[in-house]
Image (cartoon, rainbow, N blue to C red):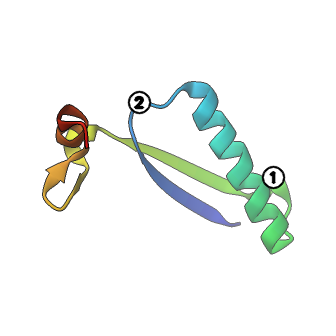
């Protein structure tokens, strides 16, 4: 049973997250020749204040326009 865990910043629409889950599921099933029902995809949303790169959070980047 393949399992994929994906971390994304919070704020995307439910439709976008649903499309991501579906597309990743299909790609894994196709790549591994696995039954689609056996594929598990876990999506974790991280608040922008808790995701940083270079010591600067995504929230700070958005505020500064970078």
Say few, some or many: other residues with alpha carbon within 10 Å of mark 2 (under 14 / 14 to 19 / 20 or more): few
Expressed as whole percent of the image width and height from the top left, the position of residue 32 reads 79, 73
Of the image marks 1 and 2, the number of the one nearer the N terminus: 2
Q: Pick the residue in front: 43 or 54.
A: 54
User: In the visual, does 41 lie left or right of 43?
Assistant: right
Expressed as whole percent of the image width and height from the top left, the position of residue 6 reads 50, 54
Expressed as whole percent of the image width and height from the top left, the position of residue 59 reads 22, 37
Q: Which mark is residue 49?
A: none
**Residue projecting furthest to the front:** 65
Q: Which mark is residue 11?
A: 2
Q: Which mark is residue 37?
A: 1
Instruction: Choose top left, top right, bottom left or bottom right for residue 27.
Output: bottom right
Expressed as whole percent of the image width and height from the top left, the position of residue 66 reads 25, 44
* SS state under label 2: loop
Report, in whole angstroms, how far the alpha carbon at label 1 lies from the one at label 2. Answer: 28 Å
Q: Residue at x 66, y 55 (%)?
A: 40
Up the image or down, 62 lies above or below 52; here it is above
Q: Residue at x 60, y 33 (%)?
A: 16
Q: Quadrant of the N terminus?
A: bottom right
Q: Residue at x 41, y 30 (%)?
A: 11
Q: Residue at x 29, y 38 (%)?
A: 47
* SS state under label 1: helix
**Residue projecting furthest to the bottom:** 32
User: In the visual, does 36 lie left or right of 62?
Assistant: right
Q: Pick the residue in front: 49 or 58.
A: 58
Q: Pick the residue in front: 51 or 33.
A: 51
Q: Pick the residue in front: 16 or 45.
A: 16
Say few, some or many: other residues with alpha carbon within 10 Å of mark 1 (under 14 / 14 to 19 / 20 or more): few
User: In the visual, does 34 lie left or right of 47?
Assistant: right
């Amino acid at each position: 049973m393949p399992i994929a865990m994906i971390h994304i910043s919070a704020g995307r629409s439910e439709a976008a997250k649903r499309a991501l889950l579906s597309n990743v599921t299909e790609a894994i099933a196709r790549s591994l020749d696995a039954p689609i029902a056996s594929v598990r995809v876990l999506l974790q949303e991280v608040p922008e204040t808790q995701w940083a790169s270079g010591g600067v959070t995504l929230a700070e980047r958005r505020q500064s326009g970078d």
